[in-house]
Image (cartoon, rainbow, N blue to C red):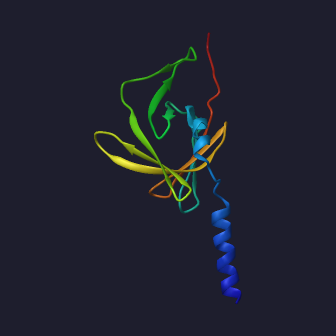
């Protein structure tokens, strides 16, 4: 009985950590996101103090893209023509981002999404925590 109770607690703990994300909330992902940290499956964390690139997402409906952009000293962003196509899939209530480039395909699950925070997990169970970048300028 004690073992069953322990298993139930563990299951509740892991299912309780993930935010339910409605597809209507996906508009919050649009825009610029700066990585804060990565949490590895073994519990270790990698902090990102300075980022030379920022992710830009644009999703309309179930399709979109992600680009890496470079912040400039004047507060603008430098972009190139490279992007990752995204297809959004709702898999039993989990929001999955399927990425495709001419070179690779992969997927990530959205764990949390708000106006200021984004957490996604890849196939290697690495969680990436993003925040909205703060604008800066040296003008």
> Residue 104: image x %, image y %?
32, 45
Is 18 or 23 nearer to us in this picture? 23
Question: Quadrant of the image for the N terminus?
Answer: bottom right
Q: In the visual, does 5 lie left or right of 65? A: right
> Residue 76: image x %, image y %?
54, 17
> Residue 105: image x %, image y %?
34, 47
Question: Quadrant of the image for the C terminus?
Answer: top right
Give the residue displayed 67% in from the left and 36% down from the top: 115
Q: Is residue 8 above or below residue 121?
A: below
Give the residue displayed 57% in from the left and 45% down from the top: 23
Q: In the visual, does 17 lie left or right of 121? A: right
Count of labels shown?
Answer: 0
Give the residue displayed 53% in from the left and 61% down from the top: 41
- Please identify the residue farthest to the top as the structure is shown: 139
Q: Is residue 11 above or below residue 53?
A: below
- Please identify the residue farthest to the left as the structure is shown: 102
Give the residue displayed 44% in from the left and 32% down from the top: 67
> Residue 137: image x %, image y %?
62, 16
Is 41 or 67 nearer to us in this picture? 67
Quadrant in the picture for residue 11: bottom right
Q: In the visual, does 53 lie left or right of 111? A: left
């Amino acid at each position: 009985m004690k073992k069953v109770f322990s298993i139930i607690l563990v299951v509740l703990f892991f299912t309780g950590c993930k935010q339910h994300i409605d597809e209507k909330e996906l508009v919050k992902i649009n825009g610029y996101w700066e990585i804060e940290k990565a949490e590895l499956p073994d519990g270790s964390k990698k902090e990102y103090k300075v980022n030379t690139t920022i992710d830009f997402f644009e999703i309309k409906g179930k399709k979109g893209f992600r680009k890496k952009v470079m912040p400039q000293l004047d507060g603008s962003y430098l972009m190139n023509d490279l992007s990752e196509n995204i297809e959004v899939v709702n898999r039993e209530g989990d929001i999955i981002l399927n990425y495709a480039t001419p070179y690779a395909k992969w997927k990530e699950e959205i764990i949390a999404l708000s106006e200021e925070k984004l957490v996604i997990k890849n196939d290697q169970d690495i969680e990436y925590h993003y925040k909205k970048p703060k604008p800066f300028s040296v003008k």
